[in-house]
Image: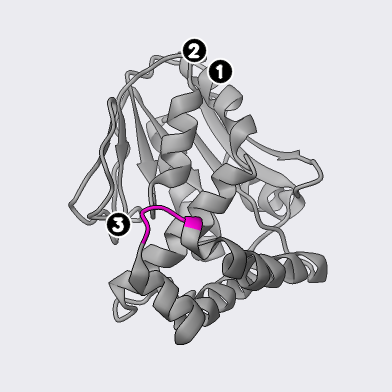
């Protein structure tokens, strides 16, 4: 199975950090995940959720952005296999410094789970296993993806990770001279972000493919649904799982 460079243990922490910060910052600038805030708020209102946990948080930027948009200010824990040690915790949102493998985690009652643009990192079998686990525990979750397969999306990614990154690298926070060095002078960062972006598109799925993936998992007491939100920035595909007996 194809893997992004950031998924390898040997991949330099600095390159992983810069890549995830760039992707997270662009998602905030373009408000790609903004529709998820309304959906998550409704999920909170409809279920006995007392806290949120974000999975595969990466830079933590997308989750923190969505947390700011919520009407219900409940605690949110960010987790990742490669935690972002430099994340600046905010009121109500904390990044766990302990590595967390989403494939090994066990859902906790009354916790709502989120995942932003990380689901495509897993194989179809792992994706099904994750959703089956949530179904078994009747745990509410939202998985949001901003990538879909296709040549047009490959072109968009190449444009974003090269031209856009060259123009915006100095404005990605936190500011880093090393980021600029490895973007402009020794363009390793430019290559790795572009490579991972292309691989991510190749591994992504359409809403129809996700629907096929989950069609046999739903049970009477737990509903799984797949949705697409379209706009000029591109499609946002999300999978939502919610219990029906709460």
Of 216 and 188, nearer the camera is 188
At label 3, counting other C-alpha atoms closer than 10 Å, the crowd grade (few under 14, some 14-19, many 20 or more) is: few
- Magenta stretch: helix, strand or loop mostly: loop
Residue 48 lies left or right of residue 203; in this view the side is: left
Q: Name the residue under label 3.
A: 101
The residue positioned 49% from the left and 55% from the top of the image is: 171
| Alpha carbon distance from label 2 to label 1 | 5 Å
Residue 95's mark?
none
Of 105 and 167, nearer the camera is 167
Residue 45's mark?
2
Quarter occupied by residue 81: bottom left
Is 173 magenta? The answer is: yes
> Given contact means CB atoms under 8 Å apart, are the residues at marks 2 and 1 in contact?
yes
List x then y, in percent, for residue 91: 27, 26
List x then y, in percent, for residue 109: 31, 26
Location of the C terminus (image quadrant): top left
Considering only order in the chain, which callout, 3 or 1, is on the residue closer to the N terminus?
A: 1
Dot 1: element? helix
Q: Please give the range of residues in magenta.
A: 171-175
Dot 2: element? helix
């Amino acid at each position: 199975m194809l893997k992004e460079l950031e998924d390898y243990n040997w991949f330099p922490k600095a390159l992983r950090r810069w890549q995830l910060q760039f992707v997270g910052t662009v998602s905030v600038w373009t408000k790609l995940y903004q529709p998820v805030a309304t959906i998550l708020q409704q999920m909170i209102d409809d279920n006995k959720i007392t806290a949120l946990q974000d999975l595969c948080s990466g830079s933590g930027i997308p989750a923190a952005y969505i947390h700011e948009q919520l009407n219900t200010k409940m605690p949110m824990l960010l987790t990742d296999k490669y935690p972002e040690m430099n994340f600046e915790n905010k009121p109500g949102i904390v990044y766990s410094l302990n590595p967390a493998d989403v494939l090994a985690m066990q859902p906790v009652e009354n916790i709502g789970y989120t995942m932003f643009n990380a689901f495509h990192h897993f194989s179809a079998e792992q994706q099904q296993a994750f959703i089956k686990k949530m179904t078994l525990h009747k745990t509410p979750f939202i998985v949001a993806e901003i990538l879909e397969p296709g040549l047009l999306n490959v072109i968009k990614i190449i444009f974003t990770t090269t031209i856009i990154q060259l123009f915006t690298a100095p404005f990605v926070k936190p500011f880093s001279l090393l980021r600029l060095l490895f973007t402009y002078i020794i363009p390793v960062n430019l290559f790795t972000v572009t490579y991972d972006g292309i691989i991510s598109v190749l591994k992504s799925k359409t809403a129809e493919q996700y629907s096929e993936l989950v069609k046999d998992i739903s049970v009477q007491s737990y509903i799984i649904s797949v949705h697409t939100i379209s706009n000029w920035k591109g499609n946002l595909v999300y999978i939502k799982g919610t219990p029906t007996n709460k």
